[in-house]
């Protein structure tokens, strides 16, 4: 199907949305689907809806829809909980697979929550584990036989810089380490072949490029040949082989279902299920080509118009995901001025202005119009208005 597909989204008139890398817009039909879940299924069926409306199967069924976007086979992706929880699950399971090793390797550019979860797990286990975080460019050289697990986010949340998934996974496996990829800024943004690279685990969220809504469930992938040997650290009852047998001892499900923890968030899953409709028929290679064309045009336009902004993303389009970041000392205030004028991006400390490019609902006209407004805000100093200096809790 052709891109963009703006008619599938609720986009306010006169607004250019360049923040789908942080929170995707509302897909048309998603609100109605949520109301059906609330009014007809919950309201009409009550507890019977777990069976009659298929609630119990939603984590796996929607996981299969996500699997198609990350190059994973059916049955290998489970949804539910938060991304931080899924990071914890994958890390804990991976460490048990390499009990003789004591190093978790990540990088300084990784999303802070991933690093917090790793350190929290280390503190909980209290057996001499170490978290190492070299510069992103030095990760490959830091993969040694001491490393139990390599845990990286494929696309950097600040700059959009992209790790070479195939090469790093091969290096990790060459020294006997387990590989975990965080696909938070990859799923729905760039082509991913998680099965092809043979990584043991992948995790991700669904509220960015997948447009599942704020707080949408996370997902976790486990390589199918390993599933039955994975020892879940969070042994929730819905990861049990027979949850309603109510056994006192934990007996894990013989599939990726063992990575489920608690009761799935049904209304949020319904929203995500509806959001996945927009991906029907989308070729990820075509989407990637469209994304790069938009981002390249944006960089050219902004650099020509605003010499005071510094490109903070890789110049080589093959080395970045589906976002472009510019550094500007007054980036927070400038972003507030842009938002006030209908161009929505976001800011990340200390000086990064982020712009996401989602070909599902953006076109070249949007890019040029956004650059024109950025030129006005930066070159006319519109960001100097005192109201743009006051920082909100969410930036």
Image: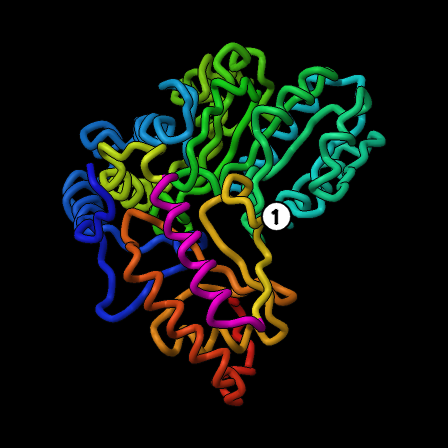
Where does the magenta region start and end? Answer: 288-308
Is residue 358 visible in the rendered image? The answer is yes
The relative height of residue 130 versus residue 352 in the rendered view (above or below) is: above
Q: Is residue 262 left or right of residue 233?
A: left
Q: Position of residue 336 (x, y in %)?
A: 47, 76
Q: Which residue is mark 1?
A: 111
Residue 17 inside the magenta-drawn segment = no
Picture residue at 21% right of the left edge, 48% below the top: 5
Q: Position of residue 97 (x, y in %)?
A: 68, 17
Q: Main secondary structure of the magenta part?
A: helix
Please state which of residues 313 and 307 is positioned toward the viewer in this rendering.
307
Is disc 1 placed on a helix, strand or loop? loop
Picture residue at 35% right of the left edge, 33% below the top: 284
Q: Is residue 52 left or right of residue 196?
A: left
Q: Is residue 108 left or right of residue 322?
A: right
In which image quadrant can residue 384 be found?
bottom right
The relative height of residue 164 versus residue 23 in the rendered view (above or below) is: above
Q: Position of residue 318 (x, y in %)?
A: 51, 39
Picture residue at 65% right of the left edge, 42% below the top: 117
The N terminus lies in which quarter of the figure? Answer: top left
Is residue 247 visible in the rendered image? The answer is no
């Amino acid at each position: 199907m052709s891109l963009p597909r703006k008619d599938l989204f609720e986009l306010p008139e006169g607004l250019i949305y360049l923040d789908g890398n942080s929170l995707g817009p509302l897909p048309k039909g998603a609100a109605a689907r949520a109301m059906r879940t609330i009014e007809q299924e919950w309201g009409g069926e009550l507890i019977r809806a777990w069976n009659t409306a298929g609630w119990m199967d939603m984590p796996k069924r929607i996981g299969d829809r996500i699997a198609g976007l990350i190059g994973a086979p059916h049955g290998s992706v489970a949804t539910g909980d938060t991304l931080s929880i899924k990071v914890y699950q994958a890390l804990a399971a991976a460490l048990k697979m390499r009990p003789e090793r004591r190093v978790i390797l990540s990088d300084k550019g990784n999303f802070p929550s991933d690093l917090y979860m790793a350190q929290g797990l280390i503190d909980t286990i209290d057996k001499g584990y170490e978290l190492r975080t070299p510069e992103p460019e030095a990760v490959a050289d830091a993969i040694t036989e001491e490393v139990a697990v390599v845990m990286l986010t494929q696309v950097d949340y600040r700059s959009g810089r992209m790790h070479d998934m195939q090469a790093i996974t091969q290096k990790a496996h060459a020294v006997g380490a387990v590989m975990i990829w965080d696909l938070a800024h990859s799923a729905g943004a760039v082509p991913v072949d998680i099965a092809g690279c043979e990584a043991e685990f992948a995790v991700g969220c669904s509220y960015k490029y997948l447009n599942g809504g704020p707080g949408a469930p996370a997902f976790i992938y486990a390589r199918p040949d390993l599933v039955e040997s994975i020892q879940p650290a969070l042994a929730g009852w819905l990861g049990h082989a027979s949850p309603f047998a109510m056994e006192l001892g934990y007996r894990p499900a013989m599939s990726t279902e063992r990575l489920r923890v608690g009761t799935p968030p049904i209304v949020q899953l319904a929203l995500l299920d509806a959001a996945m409709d927009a991906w029907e028929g989308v070729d990820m290679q075509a989407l990637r080509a469209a994304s790069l064309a938009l981002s390249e045009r944006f960089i050219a336009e902004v650099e020509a118009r605003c010499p005071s902004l510094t490109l903070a993303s890789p110049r080589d389009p093959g080395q970045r995901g589906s976002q472009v970041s510019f550094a500007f000392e007054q980036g927070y205030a400038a972003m507030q001025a842009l938002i006030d004028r209908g161009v929505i991006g976001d800011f990340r400390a200390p000086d990064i202005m982020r712009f996401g490019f989602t070909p599902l609902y953006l076109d070249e006209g949007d890019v040029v119009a956004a650059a024109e407004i950025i030129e006005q805000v930066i070159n006319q100093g519109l960001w100097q208005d005192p109201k743009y200096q006051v920082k909100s809790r969410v930036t």
